[in-house]
Amino acid sequence: KSVTKTETNATFPYPNLLSENEQSYSLLVVGDNDNPIEKNKKIIGKVVDILSLPELKMAKTAYPELNIKTEPAYILFDHSGVIHQSKDVKELTTYLEQK
């Protein structure tokens, strides 16, 4: 299992952001300090791992290759890379509901 994961994620620069398997997602939240994403049941139903960074500057320093330009930013990952990027939590929720 771990061998496959290593090969699958070898091209993505930040494998720690990826979900553990094909059935789950992980999420990077940048700058949304007012709405605790962990309390959104529609999101936590599909997203296993959530990493929240309080400000854009921090995200750009940690993950420059994601090319994050605005905050808030919601970046959704599957087991191989970015699958959705949004500035709006409602849009992210709608996207997840369609999955």
Image (cartoon, rainbow, N blue to C red):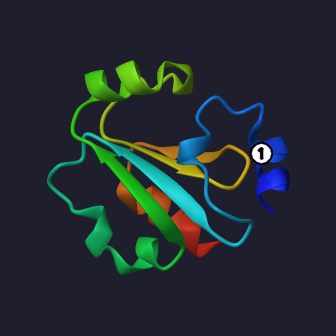
> What amino acid type should be assigned to the residue bearing mark 1?
Thr
Q: Quadrant of the N terminus?
A: bottom right
Residue 24, percent from left and from top: 63, 69
Q: Where 37 sits versus 67, above or below?
A: below
Residue in the foreground of this view, choosing between 11 and 71: 11
Residue in the foreground of this view, choosing between 2 and 44: 2
Q: Is residue 22 left or right of residue 60?
A: right
Q: Is residue 53 left or right of residue 93?
A: left
Residue 91, percent from left and from top: 46, 57
Q: Quick one: which residue is furthest to the left in this view?
A: 34
Q: Residue at x 56, y 21 (%)?
A: 65
Residue 13 falls in which quadrant of the image? top right
Q: Residue at x 17, y 49 (%)?
A: 33
Q: Where 18 sits versus 95, above or below?
A: above
Q: Is residue 34 left or right of residue 41?
A: left
Residue in the foreground of this view, choosing between 4 and 95: 4
Residue 62 falls in which quadrant of the image? top left
Q: Quadrant of the C terminus?
A: bottom right
Q: Where 45 sits versus 60, above or below?
A: below
SS at mark 1 in the image: helix
Residue 21, percent from left and from top: 70, 65
Q: Which residue is mark 1?
A: 6
Residue 68, percent from left and from top: 45, 26
Q: Residue at x 54, y 51 (%)?
A: 76
